[in-house]
Amino acid sequence: MSLWKRLSAWADGEEREQWYSRPKPRREKPRRTGEHRQHEGVFELVKGLNKEQKTRVFNTLYYISCVVVCVVMMSVLTLIMVNLPPFGDPANPTNNELSRYYIEHGLEDAGAINLVGNMILSYRVFDTFGESSVLFLATTSVMMLMLRDSRNTGRDLLRDFRRENTAELEALDHLLRSCSRLLVPMVFTFGVYVIFNGHLSPGGGFAGGSILGGGLILYAQEFGTTGVSRYFTNHLYHIIKVTALAIYGVLLLYYGFMGVNGLANHIWLGIPGTILSSGIIMPINVAVGFEVACTIYAFYSLFHKGEIK
Amino acid sequence: MLPFYQNLPFFSIVACMLTGIFTSLIHNGRTAFRVNLVLLSAVAAAQLTTLVCVVRSGAAYDYMVGIIGHPWGNELRVGPLEAALCLAFAVVMMMCVLGGWEDLNHDIHPEKLPLYFVMCDLMMASLMALTYTNDLFTAYVFIEINTIAACALVMAKDNGATIAATMRYLMMSLLASGLFLFGLSLLYWITGQLLIPDVRDAIQQLYATGQYAIPLTLILGMMMTGLSVKSALYPFHTWLPDAHGSATTSSSAILSGLVLKAYIVLIIKIIYQVVTPEIFNALHLNNVFLVMGVLAMITGSLNAIWETHVKRMIAYSSVAQIGYIFLGIGLGTRAAMIAAVYQILVHAFTKPLLFCCAGELASANWHHKHLYYLRGAGHHAPLAGLGFTLGGLSMVGVPLLGGFAVKFYLADAALLGSWQLVVALGALAASSLLNALYYVPVIVNIWSKNLHGDPDPLPGLRRKPVHAPFVVSTLCLSLGAVALGIFLQPVADLLALGLSLM
């Protein structure tokens, strides 16, 4: 339908059938997806060729444009790199009063020996709350897509899952089982150690939480998902996840409000170096740790089974 | 102790995030919907209070979260412009959810419906944080939240078309996030700061001494490219028609009305607060925006003319309307920037109106979205037909409606330019004509029924009963579109005040 035809039809008051013709009945195969429709514009140029030739022309154009984009991007980045300040130079712009302040005053302001912990969980606590919400959001969107419901899981698929579960329990891998029986307690202990020492040594909630999550996945490999669901259920998962983030959010609200208004926040900083010190950093580390562990296990479980068990 | 109203933006952001987190415990879609509405009304009230107080005090303020002292922690910056935009975002978000509530029940599995509102809550938090932030890295964190939530909103309908569209959107979005993050890290490497006022001082010093001139230009180019991909500027708009055309009604409305705008607001913040307009114009980056904006205005409309799927047509029209905003940014003057921000507001009200009404019209015609089947749909859903007519006429630029105000201010601002005058006025003329060419036939189409005795495409349809949420949403959004077209001067004055305090 050309533009002019439509215009003249409009002006002449002709039947509207001519503006919008009845869509062709949908064929079963091949389906006209958005992608096909898009490529037709390119194919207008190569009318008269058959479909294979058209695809070949498109592929050639596609590869050429890929190379061009990559070369342009590479030259831009190279151009930036050669003009940047040299690495490790004390006169660099990044070595300014900001990093000096964090190193000199971090301990008295926030109370953690781990200066990175001070920075991300005290000075920039708002950013880090955003980052933890990103994890929460990612699991929620995966749940939206993968969680089993009547639309995406038929009866056949459920039967297959059940058969897999029984097969899994019958044919357990003995090597894996004995190794992980040895490893899982150590992994859990190490994860908890990293979380609770986040303000004293390198580590913290993000690192420790991923160790815990890895331990949970190993445990699920060992005993099957039915073994995990004996104590880690969907219900518990939701409670842990929401409690952890809620504690973080409430601490952020309190700390942010008191700090900006110049009020004393009554959070005991403790003696630096002891385990119960550093004010809000330790509880937030714990909250983040549980959130990260839940996220990692939820990804595994959702992609594996389509539910959290 | 600060005056209490100064805490409201921070409270609103954290309240949105916490509500989103608690909503994931709710199993009932209707309850989650109500919680979402209560939250959005509370947020809107908070933003209104902030706006009134800030305008009265006549000054913008910085809000330092947590430890006191200027450059050490996260900061928010609240001025009249930010508060006004957030107020509009909250109101429009509420109207999008209300207007698409019926389609949400139709399109989304009831078990997954509460999760949809988790996404809405966190989307609202990210929209506000992107508008209020005074820290470039906070902006990046909330860009991430925005990206994931936006993709999930598209994906929620969960059929083949939306999954394909989400994949494309996700790829483009992540590429853009990567460009922004990479640019941001390099910018930190040459300036040593993340807070916006400090970065501005550092950039001004670098520009004055001519140090790192090449990296500075390229880094700004990278960051701007990343944000333009996210806001669907012309050559990067390819993800938009699929994502906005296939998603459920509320998602399309939220994505086109709000999500694109948040990134543009960030671009405007970077131009005004980080780079300053003088340096931005001296680097000729504004001319790139001008050219791309003009191309978007023309090609978006041309694509829309040939589109026969009503939601894809409206989506292509978004590409054109985004072009208007970038035309305003590209003209590079204060007056043109006011026009651009005005267009952000107008489009935020008009495009959700169009999407909600198109969704209602389609559902009155057995969920057919092809224009052929929508003939006479206005008689089956009169309120939706009226809303669509109003929105379409506003897009064309009929006086008394918001679209006219934008065109008026853009033309007014272009008169001061030299070569920009011809380009901008020509683009405005051509784009208005093209807008009319696809909106007017559709409007005639939805109102015409059996005028010539031609066969009814869908015989046996009755008038669709109206639902209260849709009525409220259509009335509010129409009222917004009309009010923006009538009260030109007060709104423009408010925006001018906001831009001068930015």
Image (spheres, rainbow, N blue to C red):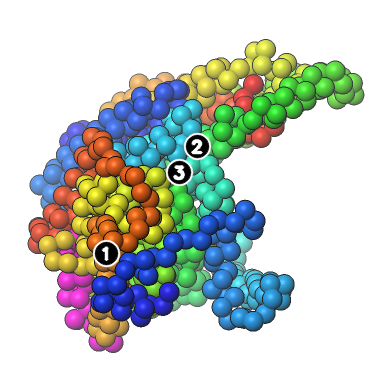
Q: Is residue A54 above or below residue B163?
A: below
Q: Chain of mark 3?
A: B
| Magenta span | B402-420
* Same chain for the residues under marks 2 and 1 in the image: no
Q: Amino acid at mark 2?
A: Leu
Q: Which residue has dot 3 on it?
A: B153
Counting residues from the start of the chain, the first of labels 3 and 1 encountered is 3
> What residue appears at the point 44 percent right and 55 percent down from the top-left corner?
B245
Q: Chain of mark 1?
A: B
Element at label 1: loop
In this rendering, the label closer to the viewer, 3 or 1: 1
The overriding secondary structure of the stretch rendered in magenta is helix
| Quadrant (top left/top right/bottom left/bottom right) for the C terminus of chain A | top right
Q: Which residue has dot 1 on it?
A: B452
> What residue appears at the point 32 percent right and 66 percent down from the top-left corner?
A16
User: Which disc, if any, is residue A137?
Assistant: 2
Element at label 2: helix
